[in-house]
């Protein structure tokens, strides 16, 4: 029974990734060290040697969406296969 809960937890993580990719990152808040950036603003890296614009940060978030969504679908599908296999195979006590 413990394995079923773990498979469900993995599936839930995959679904959460898909939800993030489809809904939550559709209109992201772009921040720089917990300060909200607006279009046209920029943010330095920790060493102050390179600057990244709002547009570059927004593009990075948008570029991550299909990757996170695809990985989420793969993880949820993997969990589904594990659950299906567990259901279709007979488990003998003690194994």
Image: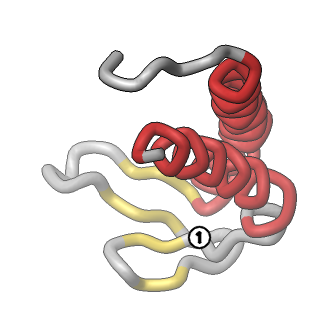
Q: Compared with residue 43, is residue 79 higher up or lower down, i.e. above or below?
A: above
In the rendered structure, the answer to whether residue 60 lies left or right of residue 66 reads left
Dot 1: element: loop
Q: Is residue 53 something one can see in this rendering?
A: yes
Res 43 → quadrant: bottom left
Q: Badge 1: few (under 14), some or many (20 or more) residues near its Cα, within 10 Å?
A: some
Question: At x 63% / y 53%, what residue is drawn?
Answer: 12
Question: At x 60% / y 48%, what residue is drawn?
Answer: 8
Q: Nearer the viewer, residue 16 or 64?
A: 16
In the rendered structure, the answer to whether residue 57 lies left or right of residue 45 reads right
Q: Which residue in the structure is indicated by mark 1? A: 30
Res 3 → quadrant: top left
Q: Is residue 71 something one can see in this rendering?
A: no
Q: Nearer the viewer, residue 12 or 35?
A: 12
Q: Residue furthest left?
A: 47
Placement of the C terminus among the 4 image quadrants: top left
Q: Compared with residue 7, is residue 47 higher up or lower down, i.e. above or below?
A: below
Q: Residue 24 at x, y = what percent?
A: 75, 68
Q: Residue 6 at x, y = what percent?
A: 46, 44
Q: Nearer the viewer, residue 68 or 93?
A: 93
Q: Residue 23 at x, y = what percent?
A: 84, 65
């Amino acid at each position: 029974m413990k394995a079923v809960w773990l498979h469900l937890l993995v599936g839930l993580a995959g679904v959460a990734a898909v939800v993030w990719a489809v809904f939550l990152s559709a209109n992201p808040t772009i921040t720089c060290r917990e300060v909200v950036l607006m279009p046209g603003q920029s943010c330095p890296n920790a060493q102050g040697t390179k600057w990244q614009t709002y547009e570059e940060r927004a593009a990075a978030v948008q570029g991550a969406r299909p990757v996170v969504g695809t990985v989420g679908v793969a993880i949820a599908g993997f969990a589904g296969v594990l659950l299906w296999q567990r259901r279709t195979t007979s488990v003998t006590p003690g194994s």
